[in-house]
């Protein structure tokens, strides 16, 4: 039309349109380089950028992993401390946290009551004890109507006067033990109060002082235990009134108490002996006290699961032994300032847990 040469092929395009397409993209036998794919140089540049970003990312991720490991360890220990504190408060017992730098762990010890006896009347089928551990009297041992709480067990100071409180099978723990009793001396005397063979016990010395002992093992349980003694020194067991005596061992210290006051202690870290052949006795064949015994309570210590550190985190230091009292507070006899647990990751980053005097746990 209007003098324009028009030629149509099967595509419906004119000759001029076909020539324009060939000019822009080339013919079937020759291609313009502007229409080619990615070049080798462009590919190398992209690979370089990707590797650079990956290198930066690995470094940042590694740093994050170390920090995260320290955070996770701190969170786990914080949970353990809260469990030990809550358990102590709810059960009226003590709680202990031990920092073991050499083994790279933080150990939380729970005190579990396994026996408790008040020596009430023999009505309804005999004397009853807690946890189905009913005492069996021997020799001249007898019940007395006047105890610290209700009735009491009276011993006459003669060998063989005793009460068998229970077999040792349910009392086993190589971590530690807590043993308490209320005692009323009728006269000055020497004798046993309560004991379990060579494993642990409390007695009165001939000068009226208090003594306690624990048996510990260096290795195999078949060996004879080494006996660790503690003595109250000038502190005496009074005559004619009730007094509470106590022995405590937690593989940190052997401690002796008289009326809730610590009167002796010594350092010791070996496992507690397990004298399987001996039951727990009040009095005993070696010679009991002359007086009354009431409210005998036996607890064993065991670790709460947790506290193990990963290879990326170390226990750097802090308060070596952290003790909670039965109210869930830091025991004021051992803590005048808040306790601390310091953790360190491989890159030197530290996290510090702080346990306040009221038992609250936080991060510093």
Image: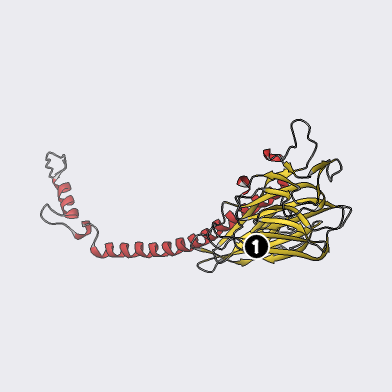
Q: Is residue 121 above or below residue 51?
A: above
Q: How is the image coloured?
A: secondary structure
316 relative to 23 in the view: left or right: right
Q: Position of residue 167 (x, y in %)?
A: 64, 45
Please state which of residues 171 and 324 is positioned toward the viewer in this rendering.
171
Q: Is residue 336 above or below residue 169?
A: below
Quadrant location of the C terminus in the rendered image:
bottom right
Quadrant location of the N terminus in the rendered image:
top left
156 relative to 85 in the view: left or right: right
Which residue is the site of mark 1?
Answer: 227
Q: Residue furthest bottom?
A: 348
Q: Residues within 10 Å of mark 1 (few under 14, many from 20)?
A: some
Please state which of residues 48 and 160 is positioned toward the viewer in this rendering.
160
Res 295 seen here: yes
Q: Residue furthest right?
A: 240
Q: Residue furthest top?
A: 124
Measuring 73% from the left and 48% from the top, which residue is drawn there? 297
Q: Position of residue 33 (x, y in %)?
A: 19, 60
Q: Is residue 230 above or below residue 162?
A: below
* Secondary structure at numbered mark 1: strand
Res 351 seen here: no
119 relative to 238 in the view: left or right: left
Please state which of residues 242 and 101 is positioned toward the viewer in this rendering.
242
Q: How many discs appear?
A: 1
Measuring 66% from the left and 59% from the top, which residue is drawn there? 214
Q: Position of residue 70 (x, y in %)?
A: 54, 60
Quarter of the image for residue 213 reads: bottom right
Q: Position of residue 313 (x, y in %)?
A: 52, 63
């Amino acid at each position: 039309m209007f003098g324009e040469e028009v030629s149509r092929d099967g595509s419906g395009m004119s000759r001029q349109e076909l020539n324009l397409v060939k000019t822009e993209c080339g013919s079937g036998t020759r291609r313009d380089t502007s229409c080619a794919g990615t070049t080798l140089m462009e590919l190398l540049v992209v690979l370089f950028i990707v590797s650079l970003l990956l290198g930066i990312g690995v470094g940042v991720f590694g740093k994050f992993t170390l920090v995260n490991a320290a955070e996770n360890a701190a969170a786990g220990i914080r949970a353990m401390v809260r469990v030990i504190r809550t358990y102590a408060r709810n059960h009226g017992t003590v709680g202990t946290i031990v920092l073991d730098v050499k083994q790279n762990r933080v150990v939380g010890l729970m005190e579990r009551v396994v026996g408790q006896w008040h020596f009430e009347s023999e009505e309804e089928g005999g004397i009853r004890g807690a946890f189905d551990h009913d005492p069996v009297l021997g020799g001249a041992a007898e019940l007395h109507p006047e105890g610290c709480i209700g009735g009491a067990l009276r011993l006459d100071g003669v060998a063989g006067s005793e009460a068998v409180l229970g077999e040792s099978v349910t009392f086993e723990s190589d971590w530690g033990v807590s043993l308490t009793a209320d005692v009323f001396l009728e006269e000055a005397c020497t004798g046993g109060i309560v004991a379990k063979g060579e494993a642990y016990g409390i007695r009165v010395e001939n000068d009226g002082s208090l003594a306690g002992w624990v048996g510990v093992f260096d290795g195999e349980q078949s060996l004879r235990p080494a006996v660790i003694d503690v003595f109250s020194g000038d502190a005496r067991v009074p005559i004619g009134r009730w007094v509470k005596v106590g022995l405590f061992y937690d593989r940190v210290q052997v401690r002796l108490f008289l009326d809730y006051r610590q009167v002796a202690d010594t350092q010791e870290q070996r496992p507690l002996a397990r004298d399987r052949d001996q039951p727990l006795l009040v009095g005993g064949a070696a010679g009991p006290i002359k007086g009354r015994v009431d409210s005998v309570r036996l607890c064993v210590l065991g670790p709460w699961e947790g506290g193990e550190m990963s290879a990326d985190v170390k226990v750097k230091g802090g308060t070596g032994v952290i003790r909670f009292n039965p109210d869930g507070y830091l025991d004021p006899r051992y803590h005048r300032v808040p306790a601390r647990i310091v953790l360190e990751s491989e890159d030197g980053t530290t996290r510090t847990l702080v346990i306040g005097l009221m038992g609250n746990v936080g991060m510093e």
